Every structure is written in structure tokens, then in C-alpha cells.
Amino acid sequence: MKFMRALALLFFLAGLAAPALADELRPGYLELTQSSAANWRMIWKAPIKGGLATNATPALPASCTATKPRRELVNGSVVALSNVTCKGALAGQKIGLKGLGATFSDALVRIAPLGRPVQAARLTPDEPLTMVMAEPQPAQVARTYFALGVEHILTGYDHLLFVVSLVLLLVGGWQVAKTVTAFTVAHSITLIATSLQLISVPRRPVEICIALSIVFLAVEIVKARPGAPRLSERIPWLVAFAFGLLHGFGFAGALAEIGLPEGEVPVALLTFNLGVEAGQLVIVSGGLFFLALLRRFASAQLPLARIALSYGIGSTAAFWLIERALA
């Protein structure tokens, strides 16, 4: 029993450490937008956590000079704005971040030249520079957005806890598979529709409702009784589909911070979504493996483990709900 209480407390404390807006992507973000033949506007957004704000700075070609940046603190990140003047085209040259190797963080670079497609690439401590191409390659876009999708589901704590809650609620592998598929289809619909600007929903109410959806599932797990299935157990796929539509708006909000490369929107959307699904598969597989271990070695503790975890998840989501409502 002490172990189960500790498990619930661990989940709750982890939730307190997580940001209220769990849909924010945490890599740094470097953007260059061309305003005329020789002039660019540069934005460098560096999260304070992870060391990017203190260790990493934009690395530009020798033919480019930047003005002194104007800095401001926005949602836990230092945002630096400056103007860049370049002699000649950037195509064929490298840009990136100096000092990225001293951090444990990644960064996304987005280059928007006049009259040509937007290029997006992922920078890592091992590869802190990227080549500016005259035309972005679909393979590069696919790799970048797939990795972003995986990272978002694995570090987007609210989505992660929702999927974990589905596994705890349903326990059975086949039922989990069908329900998670419904969740996937639903959030894909709203992610694509919002990213293509077919629909628009304010972000704050979405974030509040996402936290509420996790609280709902946690309560359903606690109140579940053998022989008396509740709505979420009778038609779990419908519940998952309904909440999936909501979570899709959250995914779209995170993707909107990055933007989609012109000319490669279908590839970027598809691979971001595939990355989300790949991360989701990791979560579901890990959850089912954990439950299988409990059944094998501590079957008597399985009900207590589900309840303890649901209390931890529910308390965390309730904290997010209040924090987001008061933000």
C-alpha cells in the first residue's frame, strides 16, 4: 500500500513540475524571414530550462551581420529579435546555433525567403548547423516533422497522461488498440483542419478542456466496478473519439508555433501526425508491458496499482485545470 501511495505521489509531483501549457514544444526556435533582397528579420526563442538561453546563440554565414538583439521574456523563454543584413543569397550556406553542444536541447530552424518555399530543419547538439537549400527537400521536411511529432507526444504531458489513462481504464490489449485508434483518427481530423485554417478555436479553453478530459478518465478508473461497466467502458472508442477531437486542437496549437513549410504542407502534416502516432505506440506498449508485469508478479496488487495511478494522474490534471483556468 505504501508503494502505491508513493506511486501516486510521484505522478502528482511530476505534474507540478510540468508546465501548465503542456502543448508547448520545448526545443529552441530560430527563424529567419526575408523582408527584402539583403534584409532578414531574425527571431531566436530560447527556453530558459535546458540551458539554451545562456549557452546557445545564432550562427550566421560570414556574409551576414546582425543588429544588437532586443530581448524579452515570454512564457519561460528568452525571445531575441534582431535585423540581419546579408551580402548575396543564403542558399548553399550554413546557419544554426553556436554553443548548442553545451546543452541537452534541440532546436528548430525555420527559413522563409522571399518568393521561395519555407525551409525547416532540426538542430541537435551533434548537428548544430544546417545547409540552406534553394528548394527544401521532402525527405528533410519529413524527418524534421516526424521527430517533432514523436517529441510532442512524449513530452506533451497532458496527451501522454490521457493515453496512459486509456490503458489503465481498459487494461485489455485489443480494446485498448481499438480505442486508441479512435483517438488517433479524431485528433488527426482536428489537427489537419486547424493547420489548414479550416477551423479555429481559442487555445486557452482547449487547454482547460484537455486537462478536464484527463480528470474525467481518472474518475472513471476509480469508479469502475466489475459487472457494472460505466459509459467509458461500454463505448470507450466513442469517448476517446470525442476527446481526441479536443486534443487535436492542442496538437495544432503546438504545430502553429513552428509553422508549415510552403510547398511541403502535406508531407509536414503527415509526418508530424505519424510521429505523434509512433510516440503514442511507445506509450501504449509501455503501459501494457507494465500491466503485464504486474499481472505476472503481483497480480493481487493490480487493482491497487490502477487506483493509485489514477489518483496521481487525476490530481495532476486537476492541478493543471486550476492553473490553466486562473492563468
Image (cartoon, rainbow, N blue to C red):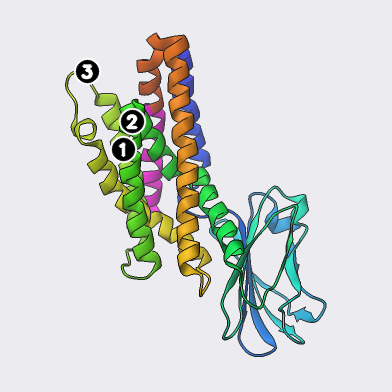
Q: What is the residue that sits farthest to the bottom in this orientation? A: 37
The C terminus lies in quadrant: bottom left
Q: Which mark is residue 282?
A: none
Whether residues under marks 1 and 2 lie with C-beta atoms below 8 angstroms apart, the answer is yes
Front disc: 3 or 2: 2
Q: Position of residue 226 (x, y in %)?
A: 22, 18
Q: Specify the segment rendered in magenta.
A: 310-327
Residue beneath disc 2: 174
Q: Would you call the spot at circle 3 few (<14 residues within 10 Å), some (14-19), or many (20 or more)?
A: few
Asked if the residue at tag 3 contacts the one at tag 1, i.e. Cβ–Cβ closer than 8 Å, the answer is: no
**Residue 52 is inside the magenta segment:** no
In the displayed structure, 193 sits above or below 83; it is above
Position in image of residue 141 (x %, y %):
57, 63
Q: Is residue 310 above or below residue 225?
A: below
| Residue named by callout 3 | 226
Image coords of residue 131 (percent x, y)? 72, 69
Q: Choose the circle earlier in sequence order: 1 or 3.
A: 1
* Residue at the spot of label 1: 178
**Real-space CA distance between mark 3 and mark 2, rounded to the nearest whole angstrom:** 19 Å
Question: Residue at position x 48%, y 15% from top?
Answer: 3
Q: Amino acid at mark 2?
A: Trp
Does the CB distance between marks 3 and 2 fall below 8 Å? no
Above or below, comparing residue 198 to residue 216 in the picture: below
Q: Amino acid at mark 1?
A: Lys
Sooner in the amino-acid sequence: mark 3 or mark 2: 2
Looking at the rendered image, the quarter that the N terminus falls into is top left
Residue 204 in which image quadrant? bottom left
Residue 317 lies within the magenta run: yes
